[in-house]
Amino acid sequence: MTSRVLLYSGILAGIAVLQTNVLVAIEIAGVRPDIALIVIAYYSVTNGSFEGEIGGFVSGLVEDLLSLAPPGFHALLRTLMGFLYGVMHNRMLVDAVLVPALLLSIGTVLKALLAGLTATLFAIDGLSSVALSQRLLVEVGYNAVLAPILFALLRLIRPLRQSRRESTTL
Amino acid sequence: MLVLISVVLLGVSTARERFRPAEAGLTVVSSVQELFFHIGDFVGSTINSVRELGELQQQYEAVLEELRRYEGVRTDVEELRREVERLEQVLGFSESLDYRNVPARVVGKDPSNLFAAITIDKGSADGMQRNMPVVAVQGGSQGLIGRIETVGRSTSIVIPLFDSANYVAARLQQSRYEGLVHGTPSRDGTLTMRYVSSQARGSVRYGATVVTSGMNSIYPAGIRIGTVTSVQAKPYETSLQLTIDPIVDFSTLEYVFVITPENE
């Protein structure tokens, strides 16, 4: 479990950095897909709330360092999202397209609502209206489209890790 | 029998002038020899041609590879030439600015869609400090970008003008009416100027330039912010609200200039 947590934390931290520059190239109407959220969703649904929270926290913390957000803002959001997605662990069958798209559509809206709520509670100026602006619709669509693709890619990591473990044991 | 022998002898002796067995034999053998020579020549030249074709194919592929390499080099040279032009422009702009400045390159944006940070490649090691104003030059016009919010050792985070939490004291360049400029929550690329006195109603024109007023200690006076695109004037309100189109296109931002204090 420890190696898996480290692997996913590393992936999520890397994605947070990539979202600042490389992924800017795939912006649509000034909106980038939330790749970190998609990975957190997959990781939490597959491994449960505890690991989801850790992955979410690490990802959020790195984002906080690179962002104008007050430290802890993204860490809180991502940890909560990791927990919420983790609740679905062993409770649903994740198919190839529909469930990932649905998970990310609902998750993106939920994230925006949580961001708005946090911004209101902690008096972060102007953020709640940004979180719930029309840009949210673009992000929901973008994440829903990319979710099945990234879920399929992430499914490849598990057999790779298993085969490596088996070869090490042999 | 004797008659037969005589006839044969006669025939041989009379025909010697026209028929030579050695020549006949040579003709037959040389024909076969010639045939084999031609066959051999044909086979040899065909094999040679095939070999040459193979060599030509290899040479063609080598030349093609070389061409591709040169194509890559040409693209690199083009890219370098453009980079040099950009840097020359940056240097020229840097020297043309009225303020002491440090040129910086934009290296990143905010990782989330909720905030609007711009990361630049200059930090405390380069003398950057919090609240230093940042400007850019695009299309020959100098425009305000924002101010430094967080300083790291080698990078800094800039809070841009279009962030709704960033307020800039501004004034209309011609009519001199003052107001506060900030971004809109929708981040549609426009800015809002609030608290402009309603007395300005008659004098605000579309396309009028808005500049920093210098009323707070962060931004020096006279830096261009944008131009007025619409005026919202309600009779019951004591102030006007203007929509501003920023001078700088933030989506194509590559280089910026951090204005540093004169006494440093």
Image (cartoon, grey):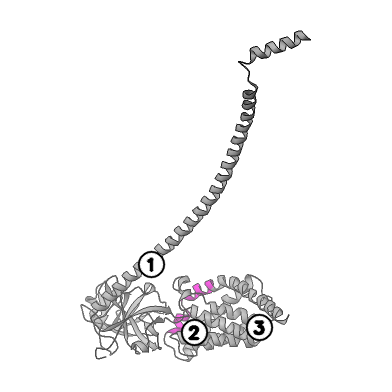
Q: Position of residue A162 (x, y in %)?
A: 69, 78
Q: Residue at x 60, y 76 (%)?
A: A103
Image quarter in which the N terminus of chain B is found: top right
Q: Is residue B110 left or right of residue B191?
A: right
In the rendered structure, the residue with mark 1 lies on which chain? B
Amino acid, disc 2: Glu
* Residue B79: numbered disc: 1
Q: Is residue B196 left or right of residue B105?
A: left
Q: Residue at x 53, y 89 (%)?
A: A76
Q: Are marks 1 and 3 in contact (CB under 8 Å)?
A: no
Q: Quadrant of residue B40?
A: top right
Q: Quadrant of residue A126?
A: bottom left
Determine whether the residue tagged by mark 3 lies in a helix, strand or loop.
Answer: helix
Determine whether the residue tagged by mark 2 lies in a helix, strand or loop.
Answer: helix
Q: Is residue B178 left or right of residue B52?
A: left
* Residue A63: numbered disc: 2
Q: Position of residue B13 (x, y in %)?
A: 66, 13
Amino acid, disc 1: Glu
Q: Name the residue at the top extreme.
A: B3
Instruction: From the image, give the main secondary structure of the stretch colored magenta.
Output: helix
Determine which residue is flagged by label 3. Answer: A47
Image quarter in which the C terminus of chain B is found: bottom left
Amino acid, disc 3: Asn
> Which span of residues is magenta-colored?
A126-142
Q: Name the residue at the right extreme.
A: B1
Q: Position of residue B37 (x, y in %)?
A: 60, 36
Assess whether residue B239 is covered by the magenta stretch.
Answer: no
Determine whether the residue tagged by mark 1 lies in a helix, strand or loop.
Answer: helix
In the rendered structure, the residue with mark 2 lies on which chain? A
